[in-house]
Image: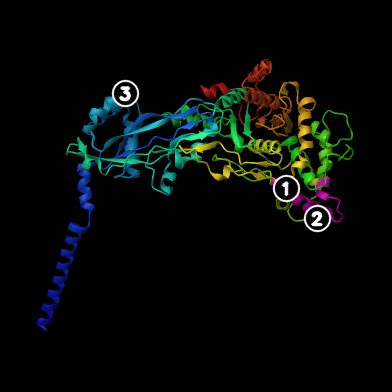
Amino acid sequence: MFEGRRLILFLVFLSIGLVFIGKLFYLQLLDDTYEKAADNNAIRKIIQVPFRGEVYDRHGKLIVYNTPVYDVYITPRKAVVQDTNRFCKLFGVTRGYFDTVTKQARAYSRVKPSLFLKHLTKEDFARIQDAMVDYPGFSITTTAFRTYQSIAFSNALGYVAEINPNSLKDQRDDYYRQGDYVGISGIESYYEDVLRGQRGVKYRMVNSNGVEKGDYKKGKLDVNPVAGKNLYTSIDIRLQEYADSLMMHKVGSVVAIEPSTGEILTMVSAPSYDPSLLAGRNFSKYYQKLALDPLKPLINRPPSAYYRPGSTFKLVQALVGQQLGILSAGSVFGHAGAPVKCHSHNTSHNDLHNAIQWSCNPYFYHAFRKILYDGTTGNTFERSAQGLQRWSELVANFGFGRKLGVDVSNEKKGNLPSVDYYNKVYKGENTWKFSNIYSLSIGEGELVVSPLKMANFAAIIANRGWYIPPHLVKGIGEKRTIDPFYKNPVSVGVDAKYFPVVIQGMQDAVLHGTVGADGRIPDITMCGKTGTSQNKKGKDHSIFIAFAPKDNPKIAIAVFVENAGFGGFAAAPIASLIIEKYLKGRVDRKSVETKFMNMSYLANVTYNRPVKKVTSDSLRK
């Protein structure tokens, strides 16, 4: 029995010994944790942030570039500051700032670098460079902030800002560190993956005092940063600046598209802001001011603002009605029996051309009624639902009620009412009919669109039935690549033969119809359609869509001016000036140009608080 116990004890101690020996073998020969820890004491790993890709306009003019600056990072576990007051004086920060930032850094990670101070100039860097040896745990990284050649493209371009904690936590590829900058909106956000480039790393040997002694292993392990790819946009920056100047003292949007390519020539959101205010250390201060502004200058209105299209939507009714075989160029409707009134012309019986030229409400009321019922008999509720289903399927082909796929980060679908939509609104099937939804006939009611959709619609008419998805970037990097999505034409399912009567009506609407004299270009054949979007808060919104020239169109445009009234007297002149500027390279109608550059509709804009304290000029200062 005694021999058995001795054997057991022997085996126990032998097992323990083998465990220790195995652990020592693993630590010394297999596990490199401690080797790396030792290396970290002798080797400094320096992250090299690449320059962000630059942005150019369609003619190769530089819009956005990078100005080199320096960021100071802190690694809490290694940080040593013996004289905090001296440190704060050297870096130009307060003791409160020092305490707050170091506390935040420890909360984020004690072993990972966190941003301590950003955007030091060359002069700042030269002043502190020699003193950095006295502060282990603090390092400097070369970076850059965005610098702008023009402020006119800010909303569509977007801005960059420090990555927030949630995005940092949820990132897919573990690329970003605390304090890194990312695109927040516009094309800066949409093309973040190509703009940001690839991070580099450099290893430097340091002594026990933190003084660098040279490259580690002669730089064999270093990885050079790769700059982000440049973006070559479709924007004509001169046209963008011109359109922006016309929208001063106004709230609204301008979108112009090259019909044959889908390339966006200008995308203006008014009021706007100076993007340089969000590029430096004072981001938080200015962002808060802009975010609280009742005129909402940070919103990129063209792809995201909602409006009823008003009378511009009558062109959709004309095309869809013809495609369904219900309307023709010779279709005539009178005013009798229509709950909507006509505008100014006295013709009581119109054909399709005249109805477009004079924007006749009763005509399109009767046309929409005929489209829905299509000569059928039976239950009125069922016929209304069947007709609306047939109608909405064709209208959706124009891009209404869905996203077009434009390359910005905030496009909205809008609303195209469907049978299911009205079944929900009226709480059941067979509970609504034409008399409940007739306002759709003239672009009102529950129909909601964005300015971008209406500019694309103008391009569809210019192309006689097709479009290429609108886009802001026409080339990425040296090879000028682009997503094939932005090359393929999309048919809207309406035969080309149905467009001439609509286009002729649009031409005559400009020459001697609903467009005022200020909206006519003497030597350019422009085809357009006015719209007045109903607005419960104050004056109606002014809308105009157009393309020019009539044959082989080069530009399609939509202009929305909030609370400016009739489309023919506010939006149309602005659109005509932009078209003239683009096609001729100059504007000959100087009196009209001066009038609308100085025109202000801000007094009509209604928000939750007075707007008289805020002007478009103040947003650009």
Residue at the limit of the structure toward the bottom, as seen here: 1
Disc 1 element: helix
Depth check: give the residue in front, 258 or 239.
258
Q: How many marks?
A: 3
Name the amino acid, label 1. Leu
Q: Which of the marked residues, 1 or 3, is nearer the chain's N terminus?
A: 3
Residue 123 tag number: 3
Marks 3/2: CA–CA distance: 76 Å
Q: Amino acid at mark 3?
A: Glu
State the residue position of label 2: 382
216 up-or-down from 529: above or below: below
The quarter of the picture where residue 119 lies is top left
Residue 161 percent across, percent down from the top left: 44, 35
Q: Is residue 371 located in the magenta-colored stretch of the structure?
A: yes
Q: Position of residue 535 (x, y in %)?
A: 71, 34
**Who comes first in sequence, dot 3 or dot 2?**
3
Magenta stretch, overall SS = helix
